Amino acid sequence: MNILLILIPVSIIMGALGLCAFLWTVRSGQYDDDAGTSARILMDDDDNQPGRN
Amino acid sequence: MTTLSACPACAAAPLAERVAAPRVAQPDIILSLPTIHCAGCIAGVERSLRTLPGVKAARVNLSLKRVNVQTETLTDAQLVTRLRDAGFEAHPLDRSVLDTGKDAEGQRLLVKLAVAGFAMMNVMLFSVAIWSGASDSTRELFHMISAAISLPAVLFCGQPFFANAWSALRVRRLNMDVPISLAILLAAGMSLYEVLNHGHHAYFDAALSLTFFLLVGRYLDHRSRRAAHSAARDLAALEVHSALRLTKDSAQSVPVSDLRVGDLVLIPTGVRVPVDGTLISLEATTDRAFLTGESAAVRSLMGAEVQAGEINLGAPFKVQATAVGADTTLRRVAAMVEMAENSRNSYTALADRAAAIYAPAVHLLALFAFIGWAVIGGDIRQALNVAVAVLIITCPCALGLAVPAVSTAAIARLYGKGFLVKSGTALERLAETDTVMFDKTGTLTVPASKAVADLLTPRQQAVARALAQSSTHPVSRAVLAALPAGEPATLSGIVEVAGRGVEGLGTEGLVQLGSGAWLGAEFEGPGLRIGCAPAIALPLTETLRAGAQTAIDGLRAQGLHPGIISGDRASAVTPLADTLGVADHRSGITATEKHTQLQTLAKQGHRVMMVGDGLNDAAALAAAHASVAPSSALDAARNAADIVILNDSLADLPLLMSVARAATRLSKQNFAIAALYNVIAVPVALAGMATPLLAAIAMSVSSITVLANAMRIRRVK
């Protein structure tokens, strides 16, 4: 069962990384314009910078 | 281990505050784009702005229907012209009225949701291990880790519920958040106590999934309502809040709030009068639709009273202020609206009424379970365990989701149909109404011209077009709109005669477009005269708004009693009411009388839905049980109304009604489903047989059933 001592921290750290990544997406405003973001994938000259406004 | 696992939630708290902090870099100009709806529009707007010299950057937000433009050299008028040429309607927005464009509240909820989700998933992993047989020291370790993750997470993520519960308790009321907060806190606290005393059962996963599911409900609710709110605020920001004050040698642009009694104010053409005052110029033509509900140009002579809110239709004129700010007629009506709104805020929402029954019942049940087990079993700890199990298994989760899930789905459905639902309880109140009162001018009718084309020869049309397009007067615009597309005639020396019309020189001699009296003709309305020929009357009468008939017939079929309440003359209201088949019509009603009449109807036991657009309707809109305003309405009316129709047509009003009724029905069904779960689960919990696994299953199944039931609102016809 000693393997738990490694696996548990590993799983929690990986989860925390995911959480931090999500918080970054929130901070950079990527959920500010859901309707616009979904429409922009159809544009050829999109600048790929969601949440710049 | 402990410090590590507690870290994400701790780290998230300061992060969330930084997220909420406003950004320093502000875009220079924000324009509202009410007509954009697709990727093509985004590309079109951005491309046309970016190719304009002087524009550094332009970015469209489709959800808010706005564009932010960074520029140092250009004015908003230049940008609006550019967009209009590209085919997009655009309005500059007053930045002081707008929020900074950042949705701080939504981001805070999203961060809490993410932290709750992260904590729930990790704790659930340990819980599954415990349920499948982890024992002794392994179980204790898992419980410890769960506690280390859950406690900070629950304290951080539960804040919205704790805050609401506290504000309700402080005024000695119970709302849904009280049992929610109690269940979350007791479950976490009891579990902590169990873990420290080497107990077998811990409800950390239940506390977290409760928080998570409820936050999902809160976030959805917030998001759909924000779309509506920002649009309403956009409309308010359209009004320009500065005025031209005349001093001895110059005209100075000052904020309206700086104007004082006695100031001389210049009112340019097409602008709203900011103060009540006396007319100093020789004459003025204004539109008083906001006060009387009647859209017609009114001529006043020097010395006449002019009221705040009138629109200058003619040449610029000067006014000496006699009342400013809160003393103007406009503001007095606004104050009346505010009072009526306050009385409406005392309406108790369905969810709160359910909470008022549910909360004491659950708390008493848990208390009896505790006393019963303590007396019979004699084991205080076990008694407390059973009481907590009862609190968790009665699952405020499904109850907390019952109404938000339905209203979110309903508001989203209605938004797609062009309705902005501004108030959380609007749909519930709408579903209760039995009478619908329409304003006439601007609501049931839109001023438009009949097919003028039939009356005129091509040459006459060309002359009329040339004269009409040189003037910004509403009547000229109506004439222009009524004319078929074509080339204007070449005229010379076109001049606008204030309050009369437009004249110029053509090959036939003098050509004139203006009021009948000015043309020397018998009729009163606008007319056209070319050379020596007699003047031709151009009938410009108001027409029925699209879908008005459908709306009235549909609402009547739904059991509502339709009526018309108008400030206009009886001779204008009666024919319209006859056309629409409305027996109950009242004419010549002032703003105050509309308000009192609605109150009288309410006293007679009717619940009235008011549909109106003018300032004279604002107080009535606020006093009605539920209210609707078209988007063309004045912002006072839009702000007073619960629901704003973005389309030009009224045809979807019956759909609005059926969605509102379905929303109330589905909410009640959801309460019934949640109650049914409780009937099954509570005896189990009372018998002391509830385990954390059972609680987790009951919670998820009931929440998902309630959400799935809410989605049925999409199928309402």
Image: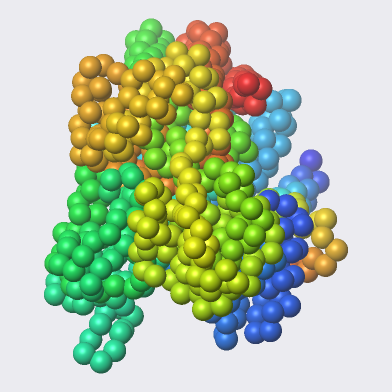
- On the question of residue B559 being in view, the answer is yes
**Location of residue B470 with respect to B450 vertically, above or below:** below
Q: Nearer the viewer, residue B241 or B191?
A: B241
Above or below — where is B446 with respect to B365? below
Q: Residue B628 occupies which quadrant of the picture?
A: top left
- The answer to whether B425 appears left or right of B698 in the picture is left
The location of residue B355, given as percent across then percent down, is 38, 24
How far across and how far down the image is residue B336, in percent? 21, 44
x then y, percent, for residue B601: 25, 22
Camera-nearest residue between B689 and B36: B36
Residue shown at 30% from the left, 18% from the top = B606
Using residue B126 as the reference point, say whether residue B13 is left or right of it: left
**By what rule are the colours in the image chosen?**
rainbow
Q: Which residue is drawn at 39% across and 40% down?
A: B441
Residue B585, by quadrant, is top left
Check the image and report above or below for B226 versus B301: above
Q: In which quarter of the image is residue B600?
A: top left
Identified at 61% across, 24% down, the residue is B713
Q: Where is residue A25 in the image (x, y as percent from the top left)?
A: 67, 59
In the picture as drawn, the residue positioned furthest to the front comes out as B532
In the shown orientation, is residue B139 left or right of residue B651?
Answer: right
Rendered residue at 25%/23% (across/down):
B602
Viewer-nearest residue: B520 or B132 = B520
